[in-house]
Image (cartoon, rainbow, N blue to C red):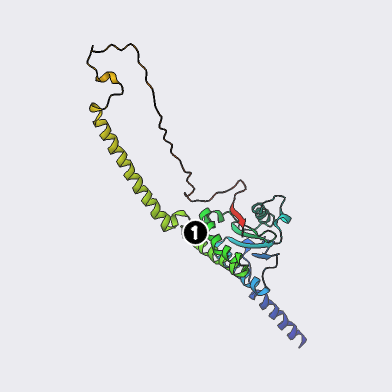
């Protein structure tokens, strides 16, 4: 009888073990959860829900999606930069999926309300510079109201949506925005019209060269009627034209630093 009970206990323990979420083998080297709440912003129930969802999305798209909250990022880096702190944590704990360590990390530092959003590996492809801006819009309004669970939930869902879009071959980027795309078409049309007008104006100018105005009074005198002993040209004013050239920051893509990370940081 005792042996039978002992066997049932072992069987129940085994079934319980296999019923728990199992992280994919490519994440086994991680020494952090997908959601690490050192600052204590979440309840146990909220953390469990976010951790489960982050693991689901990370495994589905083979790209780690992480959240870390800390009291002060300066405890994790020698730099006075939350972006560098996020990179240090990502590297120190070997976050990311597979050999490329593909992933994305949102770091919140509560001391002065700083955040950094960084990507690595395939994360650089899925989360473009423009994409990170749109992703930040999803959670910053929640964080501004100290709605942490809602903000992290929005971050996870938007990240999953962006990863799905990237897997379909169309990462969220500048050209994905129909307003920007249509604006580009309009700019092209206007540019073509301006070029056409310039060409027409130049053609008209050169066709009238035979009747152009002379620049000196001597051209209007009969030959031999006046002897000119000296000539002097005086300019009453000078007209200067300047053109301002704007740098193009709307070409899209991802800006990657020397450590192969991309990202942004600011206050929230």
146 and 154: which one is in front? 146
Residue at position x 40%, y 53% in the image: 183
138 shown above or below 263: below
Mark 1 packing: few (<14 Cα in 10 Å), some, or many (20+)?
some
- Position in image of residue 263 (x %, y %): 58, 53
Q: Secondary structure at mark 1?
A: helix
159 and 200: which one is in front? 200
Q: Quadrant of the C terminus?
A: bottom right
- Position in image of residue 94 (x %, y %): 67, 56
Q: Quadrant of the N terminus?
A: bottom right
Q: Is residue 232 visible?
A: yes
Q: Quadrant of residue 143?
A: bottom right
- Position in image of residue 162 (x %, y %): 51, 61
Residue at position x 69%, y 55% in the image: 92
196 shown above or below 61: above
145 shown above or below 232: below
- Position in image of residue 39 (x %, y %): 70, 65
Residue of label 1: 166
121 shown above or below 53: above
Q: Is residue 100 visible?
A: no
Q: Residue furthest bottom?
A: 1
- In the visual, does 213 lie left or right of 73? left
86 and 108: which one is in front? 108
Residue at position x 46%, y 54% in the image: 174
């Amino acid at each position: 009888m005792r042996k039978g009970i002992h066997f049932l206990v072992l069987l129940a323990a085994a079934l319980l073990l296999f019923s728990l979420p199992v992280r994919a083998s490519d994440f086994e080297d991680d020494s952090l959860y997908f959601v690490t709440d050192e600052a204590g912003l979440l309840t146990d129930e909220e953390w469990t829900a976010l951790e489960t969802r982050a693991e689901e999305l990370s495994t589905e798209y083979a790209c780690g999606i992480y959240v870390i909250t800390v009291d002060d990022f300066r405890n994790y880096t020698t730099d006075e930069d939350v972006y560098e702190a996020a990179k240090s944590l990502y590297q120190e704990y070997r976050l990311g999926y597979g050999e490329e360590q593909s992933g994305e990390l949102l770091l919140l530092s509560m001391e002065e309300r700083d955040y950094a959003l960084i990507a690595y590996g395939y994360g650089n492809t899925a989360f473009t510079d423009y994409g990170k801006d749109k992703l930040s819009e999803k959670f910053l309004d929640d964080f501004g109201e100290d709605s942490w669970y809602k903000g992290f939930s929005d971050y996870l869902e938007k990240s999953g949506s962006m990863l799905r879009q990237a897997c379909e071959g169309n990462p969220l980027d500048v050209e994905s925005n129909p307003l920007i795309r249509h604006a580009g078409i309009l700019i092209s049309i206007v540019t073509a019209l301006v070029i056409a007008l310039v060409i027409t104006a130049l053609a008209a100018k050169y066709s009238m060269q035979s009747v152009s105005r002379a620049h000196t009074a001597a051209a209007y005198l009969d030959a031999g009627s006046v002897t000119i002993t000296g000539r002097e040209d005086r300019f009453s004013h000078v007209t200067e034209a300047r053109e301002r050239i704007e740098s193009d920051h709307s070409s899209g893509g991802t800006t990657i630093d020397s450590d192969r990370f991309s990202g942004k940081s600011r206050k929230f």
